[in-house]
Image: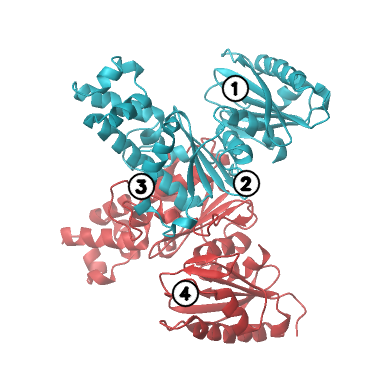
Chain colours: A red, B cyan
């Protein structure tokens, strides 16, 4: 048995529960996962989380009773003070005492909760692309546009724990309808869903585009397809990429003008384009930047932890 | 001579220098002002500030040597750590050691600096519309759209002290050009300058509008004119007000989705419309809000301190 401090982090998703043991240096030692199997009750899901927590504690070589605590990130609005899951689109567990149920299921009294996007940002902040910064923002370009914001070393949640919704910042008033009910949100233009939608529309209008060769099935189109076609010189794909990146640059520049973080990290499927994506975005954002001195600008980076950010960040909630 | 602690706040503007003595409860006891008389050197202006500081200390009944310190708010980018005024549009004092010059001019070693919009927000936070909150945002609808943000009791400045520029958040990509070089910034649609521009355009297109009767000289048009004409049933003015308030609501809702502050305070000329303005905005913002439970929403308020916010907030820099 080891004598080091072990923190357990849980990334509760709509499809999977990922759980890991993290040491004091916020390094992930081992992990385990199980399907969420929704729809289920909060008690059923927490019973599975308890099994995973005991499993990773054993893998890490510590008695479960000696762990420092359990941190959990979940989609939805989490009141960190009361431990209530106030609202969640995914689980339909409105106003559920998630912390209490998890404490009872695990027998561990020290449980900290956070919103999943915030928690992923916290992971990048303690161990990833923004390690060592006091101010950082992480944007996840996935099904939606998720975000987490660190101000002076702490997660920004707003007074009601519903803040940090950068994806629901309107960047084009009167643009297309967003799932949130507003029009022209950053998410409508910059999510992975958005680039897929733009690509499908371009394919339907242009039978000649290379995208049809790379992906003959419209339903299977991904951001990867359109970036690959553009790189091979396909004009139609190039235009989609240009439009997408211009809106992305616009939203990111808003975030910079508001927060001027030391690091702005990009995660999610689209961020797999890597340094090429960063280079194009920096080029587009250069003339938009409020800060002219390049040495003082926010550093744009690709998030470093991938899916582990959610586990590590959840464990780091115990240090906040 | 009084024994209470006295903090001196200085609001350095392009036209006037306002200076005040503030007590421990952050109440303004007395104030004095002088013209800035630009263009002048930083040494010349700081010599005048020193005279004002000694004057208000005497008015407050304390020896100048016994004051707690001097806080100063200035337009531009202020590095609070080095005490440098890094950039200012108004003064043309790029990279000036403002803190050092002010320390030498006054003989007071404890000098704290901040950006004027941030400092005004701090004033509202310690003594005005957001008193008692941990998280608050203030937006000033004036020549531009100024803003200051308080997160967990502290001013958000960003790592390079150039943050909190909510006025330079694009709300309509490809909109009209902003002074910052981007297109469609919040400031382009929601400043006092914007409502004047919209009103003048409407007057030129509509000779029949009541606005011509209220203000026969196009150059003298103010937000007050168009709000007054709209209230008297003038259709053209009503449309200008509707357009203006829709954009304002859009930008404010962005700010709420990002920060979910306890209070969002509005200052500047347009805020003189008072509770009527708040009521209209709340109506427009209701369907846009991410938080459905009205009891948990951000409170929209008119800023309470007027021009004194800059003095009180500057003094409060000494407590940050």
Q: Position of residue B172 (x, y in %)?
A: 33, 42
Q: Which mark is residue B132?
A: 2
Q: Which mark is residue B151?
A: none
To which residue does mark 4 refer? A13
Q: Earlier in the sequence, mark 1 or mark 3?
A: 1
Front one among A197 and B145: B145
Callout 4: SS: loop
Callout 2: SS: loop
Instruction: Count residues near mark 2 (Cα–Cα under 10 Å), then give few for <14, some for 14-19, many for 20+.
Output: some
Q: Which mark is residue B93?
A: 1
Q: Height in image: B234 above or below A210?
A: above
Question: Closer to the observer: label 2 or label 1?
Answer: 2
To which residue does mark 3 refer? B283
Question: Mark 3, chain letter?
Answer: B
Q: Position of residue B272 (x, y in %)?
A: 44, 30
**Dots 1 and 3 on the same chain:** yes
Looking at the image, which residue is at 46% across and 47% down?
B255
Question: Mark 1, chain letter?
Answer: B
Q: Is residue A69 left or right of residue B222?
A: right
Question: Mark 4, chain letter?
Answer: A
Looking at the image, which residue is at 25% across and 31% down?
B233
Q: Position of residue B299 (x, y in %)?
A: 49, 48
Cα distance between the residues tagged 2 and 1: 36 Å
Instruction: Count residues near mark 1 (Cα–Cα under 10 Å), then give few for <14, some for 14-19, many for 20+.
Output: some
Q: Quadrant of the N terminus of chain B?
A: top right
Cα distance between the residues tagged 1 and 4: 53 Å
Front one among B296 and B97: B296
Instruction: Count residues near mark 4 (Cα–Cα under 10 Å), then give few for <14, some for 14-19, many for 20+.
Output: some
Q: Earlier in the sequence, mark 2 or mark 3?
A: 2
Question: Mark 2, chain letter?
Answer: B
Callout 3: SS: helix
Callout 1: SS: loop
């Amino acid at each position: 048995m080891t004598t080091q401090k072990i923190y357990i982090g849980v990334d509760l998703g709509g499809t999977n529960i990922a759980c890991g043991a993290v040491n004091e240096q916020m390094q992930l030692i081992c992990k385990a996962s199980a399907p969420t199997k929704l729809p289920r009750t909060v008690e059923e899901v927490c019973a599975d989380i308890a099994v995973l927590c005991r499993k990773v504690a054993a893998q890490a070589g510590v008695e479960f009773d000696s762990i420092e605590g359990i941190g959990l990130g979940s989609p939805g609005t989490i009141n960190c003070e009361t431990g209530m899951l106030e609202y969640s689109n995914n689980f339909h567990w409105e106003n559920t005492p998630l912390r209490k149920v998890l404490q009872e299921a695990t027998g561990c009294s020290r449980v900290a909760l956070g919103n999943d996007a915030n928690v992923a940002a916290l992971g990048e902040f303690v161990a990833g692309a923004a390690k060592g910064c006091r101010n950082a923002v992480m944007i996840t370009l996935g099904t939606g546009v998720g975000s987490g914001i660190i101000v002076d070393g702490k997660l920004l949640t707003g007074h009601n724990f519903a803040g940090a919704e950068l994806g629901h910042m309107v960047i084009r008033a009167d643009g297309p309808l967003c799932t949130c009910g507003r029009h022209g949100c950053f998410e409508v233009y910059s999510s992975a869903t958005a680039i897929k939608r733009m690509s499908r529309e371009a394919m339907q209008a242009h039978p000649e585009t290379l995208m049809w060769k790379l992906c003959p099935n419209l339903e299977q189109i991904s951001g990867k397809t359109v970036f690959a076609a553009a790189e091979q010189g396909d004009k139609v794909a190039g235009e989609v990429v240009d439009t997408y990146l211009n809106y992305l640059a616009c939203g990111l520049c808003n975030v910079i003008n508001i927060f001027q973080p030391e690091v702005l990290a990009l995660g999610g499927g689209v961020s797999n384009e890597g340094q090429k994506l960063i280079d194009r975005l920096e080029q587009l954002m250069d003339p938009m930047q409020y800060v002219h001195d390049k040495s003082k600008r926010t550093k744009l980076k690709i998030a470093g932890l991938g899916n582990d950010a959610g586990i590590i960040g959840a464990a780091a909630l115990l240090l906040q």
